[in-house]
Image (tube, rainbow, N blue to C red):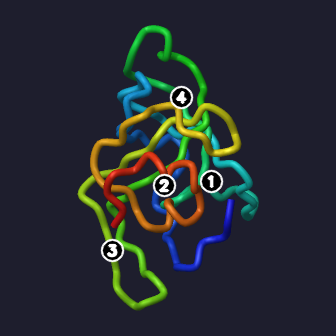
Amino acid sequence: MKALKGKVVRSMPSQAKMISCDNSGAKMLKLVSVKGHKTRKGRIPATGVGGMFLASVKKGKLDMRKTVVPAILVRQRKEYRRPSGIRIKFEDNAAIVLKDEKGNPKGTIFKGPIAKEVAERWPAVAKVAKTVI
């Protein structure tokens, strides 16, 4: 996992719900906790594009439901700034489910584009992605 170069806004707080954009069997994810998040006492943990977190599967296949899985946020609605100066935002919040903590995706197909920051930080995810914006 590499560090991000841009100023990504952490827009997805704990307990946020988002769709899963892969074919892992999960449809709706709920953010439970953020991996490696250190913050001030009392502040709600949050994540942004490229961040790894633990998610509870709310909707999906029966074997996936009610399980806690690692995931990566690949799209967010809140706009953020890249080092080149442009600002980017997506039309939805989406995440992908991982097999393990190393960043290997469980699904083999991603629906929709993923952010360039995710492809730089997680090379295993970039191999599966069709469109990188």
Q: The C terminus appears in which quarter of the rendering? A: bottom left
Q: Position of residue 21 (x, y in %)?
A: 35, 39
Q: Is residue 89 left or right of residue 123?
A: left
CA–CA distance between discs 1 and 3? Answer: 23 Å
Q: Residues within 10 Å of mark 2 (few under 14, many from 20)?
A: some
Which residue lies at the image location 24% right of the left edge and 57% below the top edge?
91
The residue beneath circle 3 is 88
Residue type at mark 1 is Pro
CA distance separating discs 1 and 2? 26 Å
- Image-quadrant location for residue 70: top right
Rendered position, 32 above or below 123: above
* C-alpha separation, residue under disc 4 versus residue under disc 1: 16 Å
Kind of residue indicated by mark 4: Ser
Q: Earlier in the sequence, mark 1 or mark 2?
A: 1
Q: Earlier in the sequence, mark 2 or mark 3?
A: 3
Q: Is residue 6 left or right of residue 75?
A: right
Mark number, residue 45: 1
Which of labels 1 and 2 is toward the front? 2
Q: Which mark is residue 56?
A: 4
The circle on residue 126 is 2
CB-based contact (under 8 Å), mark 1 and mark 2: no
